[in-house]
Every structure is written in C-alpha cells, then in structure tokens.
Amino acid sequence: MLPVIDIKKVHRIYESAAGYTHALKGVSLQVQRGEFLCIMGPSGSGKSTLMNILGCLDTPTSGTFLLEGVDVSQLTDDELAELRATRLGFVFQSFNLLPRATVLRNVMLPLIYSDCPVPEREVRAVKALASVSLPADYYDHRSNELSGGQMQRVAIARALVNDPAVILADEPTGNLDSATGEMVLKTFRRLRDAGKTIVLITHDPEVSEWADRTVHIRDGKLFTDEQERALVAAHPGTRSHT
Amino acid sequence: MKARDLLYETASALDANRGRSLLTILGIVIGIGAVIAMTALISGIKQSLVGDLGLDQARMVEMYLLLDRQTSFDDYNNLVDYMPEYETLTIMAYGSGKATSATKSVDVSVLGVLPNYPDVMGTKLTQGAFITPEDEEAGSLVVLLDQSAVRNLFGNQNESVVGKSVQVGDATYAIIGVVESSASREGGRIYMPYSTCAARITGTWSFDSMSGLAASDVDMSTIEKTTKSKLGAYFGIKEEDVEDSFYVYTMQSMLDELNATMAAFQILMTSVAGISLLVGGIGIMNMMLTNVTERIREIGLRKALGARSSDITKQFLLESVCLCISGGIIGIIFGYLGAYALAGLAGSSITQAISTGETKLVPVIDIRAVAFAAGICILIGAVFGYYPARQAAKLDPVESLHYQ
C-alpha cells in the first residue's frame, strides 16, 4: 500500500547571517496509513524542521517528499496552501486557537480555506468535536473560556475537520499537566484506532510510549529505536535524551 | 475563501478593536464631513437662488442702458419686436416721493411698471390685483404697495388696504393690491402704471432699465453677448463702445459671481478635507501595521490551516477598506448635520448677501457627493491598506507561528 508520507534523503539547509545551518542531513522516513508515529529528539535536533517539512510549511533543500504519492517539492505556494487546507491537520503545543471566536467557529476555520459548502461546515465541525469528546454545551463558548485540556481537544477537532491524510502534532502535551496530557494522548490513540494517521513530535519518552513506533532525531539524522539504544550503549558518555 | 467568510472575519476583527478603530477613523470622518458639508451648503445656496418662487429665474435677464440720449416708449415697442429671443420684455421707471396715508407719512421709492411686470419678475401679490392694460392705457391713479410700505403707512403689513387711498406727491391714488416684499426695505416701495409714473413722478417717458424673460429654447450662456450686440445695433452704438454702454445681468452671471465668492470657502474646505483624509489614511495604515504585528501568530495559524497569501491580503485589505467606509458613513452623517447647523446659524446672512431674497437656506443632499465620498473612502482604504496587507501576506508561516 502507498505510504501516506514517504520522504527520501531530505536535506534542509538554512541560510542566515551567521552562515549555513544544516538542519536535516539526509532524512528518510515512511509513515503508513493508520500509523501513530512518534518523532523524538532534543531541542536543536532538527525535529521542528522535519515537522515543518512534513506540514508543507517548508520545502526541503534537496530530496523528495511524497504526500500520498504527490511530490510536494514541485508545488507552488498556493498549491501547498491547498494541500494544508485539505490533507493536513495541525495540533500545536500552544493550541493556537482564535481567543475571541467560539469553539465551533475555531473548528470551522480550516473549512473556509477549503471551499467547503457553508451548510456542511457546522455538521463537520460538530462531528469532529464529538470525536474528541467535547461536551456540546461548550460549542458556543469562546475558546479563551476553556481549560487547557479542552482547548487542546478543540485544536484536535480543528485538525480533524477536513478529514486529513495525516495529523501532525507538535508537542501537544507540552503545555498540559500530566493528567490532562494523558487525556489528550488517549484522544490521539482513539483516533488512530479509528484509522487516522498521526505524527507526533515530543521530547518526552512517556509520551512516546503511546505511539506504535518511535523514531529518534539527533543532529539532523533519524535513528530507529534499536539504533538509538545501540548508540547510547556504545557511547556511554552520550547522554540519552530519554 | 468565500465573500461571506471574508466579511465575517472583517466584522469580527473590527469589532474586537472597536475603540481603536473609532479613534483611527476620526481623520476620515473629518475629511469626508468637510467635503459633504461644503457641497451640501453650496448646492443649497445655488438652489435657493435658482429655484425661487416657482419662477424660472435662471431665464431672467436684467438690462441697464448707460446711454447719452433719452429713450422713448417707441424704443420699447421696437425692442420687443427686435429681440424675439425674449418671451416677455418689460421696462421700469424709478422715482421717489413722500407717501401719506390717513395717519402716517413716509418716504418711498416709486416704480413705474407695465402690466407684464409680474410675468418677468415673478412678483407675488398678497392682496388685490396687479395693474391692468387699461390702467396703463388710461394712466389711472392706482398703486400697489409692498408689504414694507403697508407696514410703514398703516402700521401692520397684513392690514387690508385694498380700496384705501394713499397720497404720493400731489395726487391721491387708489390702492389696488399689495406686493410681497422680498426683503424689508427702508420706507417701502410703491408700484404704479408706467404711464402714470411718467406723467406725475418722473416727468419723462425715458427708461434706462429693462428686464426680460428669455424664451425657453434660448442658450443662456450666450444671451448676455447677443443682447448687448443687439442693443448696440438698435441704438447705433459704435462696436468698441458696446461693452460700456450696456450692463446685462443674467442669473447665470449671478451664479458665476457666487461661484467666485464661494471659491475661497471651497479652497479652504477642500484643503481641510484633503489634509484630514491624508492624515486619516496614514492613521489607517499605522493601525493596520500594528494590527498585522499583533496578529502575526493568527496569520501564521491561518496559513498553516491552508490560507493562501491572497486570502491574507484580501482579509487585511477589506479590513482597512471597511474601516474607511465606516469613517465615511459617519463623516457623511456629520457633514449633513454640520451643514444644517451652519445653514441655521449663517443661512439668512448668506442668502441676504448674495440675493435679494429672504429665502431659507436648505442644504441639499447630493447623491453624487455621497457617491464621491464613498469612492474616496474605498480608495483611501485600498491605498493605505495595501502595504500592511502585503506585509501580512508575505509573513513566513513557520516564523509567524512561533512568534512571541
């Protein structure tokens, strides 16, 4: 079966006043449909860069990225925007909800950029909110009236509303206490059981235990779980981030 | 992105910044208000002059003859035939005298007029009837008083005086009517048949002023010139002297004079408006730039959720245009309110200064001025909103998402 995400030998080099930064050094990764993948790495390892490329917010300097078989590096900015609107769902560490808008309006936000017919929007938003188990009496609350866990569930509903090929979550539990974080992770788990593809980025090993598979990123390179363990064993001086 | 989504986003963004938005549009409000107040007042003044008393005064022409020789009644009859471009032509003789009623005595001006005088001047009567051709033919001892004369001679301008008599000079005249005064005059004015006036007041049939009502198919912009040259030809004036021998005065030349008077006012208001609009526009740009900076994360989020650069441009551009339009609407309302207030304060002195009438000055709501103001607002919003909107659209989604 065609993998949802298929990246091969991706390099990303930033050019800045300080010189060149080689953030990704030949990363290859495949994510299958229905998989819950966790990408772990300390800060500065390149995990944010990888996330941005997976989210079509950034394009690789070299290498290929096929999203559902489509070569993303060939697309124009507007085509990338369309891809983000229809095929990708984002969940951020800091939720990024519009504070003045209601829960429902926040969840419907991606639909205004994807030409979804107006009558269908609320139906889809309600469906998405139901799948993250947010009680219906909150739908008309302004999003800044919610607790952190509720906000993150609204954000997950927003990521789901377009029925994307993959949900990208960047430290989704980073701003939550462990009990609420667990609730959010359970939500991801349930979505994965319902067939969604999820890529989650974290530095927290406890979070990674909820995933089907974990890859490690270190200095712009990816390692499997086994390679990581071998690396840490071979170099006892290397402080594992786990 | 659909139009209604854009409108919704714009409305909620403006609503969130209500206080700041109101302050920002003040410049636009003042600028548009000045434009509207100015145009409303000027067209109000013009209308009060042109649309006077149900008569088309725009077609009225006054002629003054500055000749060395005497004129005669035959000259008048000949001129009526000679100048067919006038539907009606009438002559007047001016005199003065002491008028005495049973109780009072006052100095009045005396006007000798023909029966067709009201057809040209649009004179309105409050009592009685005007001079008839028979009165003119017979040189009857009949007069009409204007309301000022009635007030001065009988105490109250609404006093019923038809049938009473008044003495002017050495003769006693029967009052046959009362003419509405266009402005209050010292003493008052008395109208009598031209023939009577020639025989008893001025002592001559010579006239030096005429008034005519141009036929409706005559071009008013050229009538002043043609009238002068025709009068010159009739009286045998040398071509180079024609200009100085006749003074021809049309409503058009009056309007031209008015426009010249108004020009200073217009320049002042236009510069006030222009400067306020410029400052207002810069204020709008400033606020929009602040807006973009404040909402960098929101912009990043929208881009991550699939907004194209053009969607972001449209959203911020529409916001600034709507800001300007709401300023324009408030400005239009304040402009008309201001025009009415000014008309109430200064209206009567303005109309008195420029016309004989005591007509009320009513500001005119001109749909073209409103459309012009709306156009200006959209233009300012688009021009001054474009740069901030482009700045917003150019933001990098990754950087703006992590902007603190």
Image: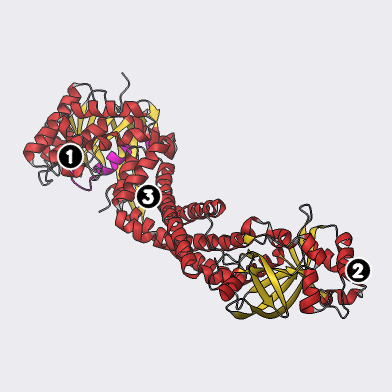
Residue A47 highlighted magenta (yes or no): yes
1 and 3 marks on the same chain: no
Chain letter of disc 3 in the image: B
Q: Quadrant of residue A227?
A: top left
Q: Residue furthest left?
A: A179
Asked whether the viewer can see residue B102, the reply is: yes
> Dot 3 surroundings within 10 Å: few (below 14), some, or many (20 or more)?
some
Chain letter of disc 2 in the image: B
On the rendered structure, is A228 left or right of A58?
left
Residue assigned mark 3? B395
Name which residue lies at 79% across and 59% down: B88
Q: Which mark is residue B234?
A: 2
Q: CA distance from mark 3 to mark 2?
A: 82 Å
Between A66 and B322, the one nearer to me in the picture: B322
- Up the image or down, B238 lies above or below B230; here it is below
Residue A234 in percent (x, y) is at: 13, 40
Q: CA distance from mark 2 to mark 1?
A: 97 Å
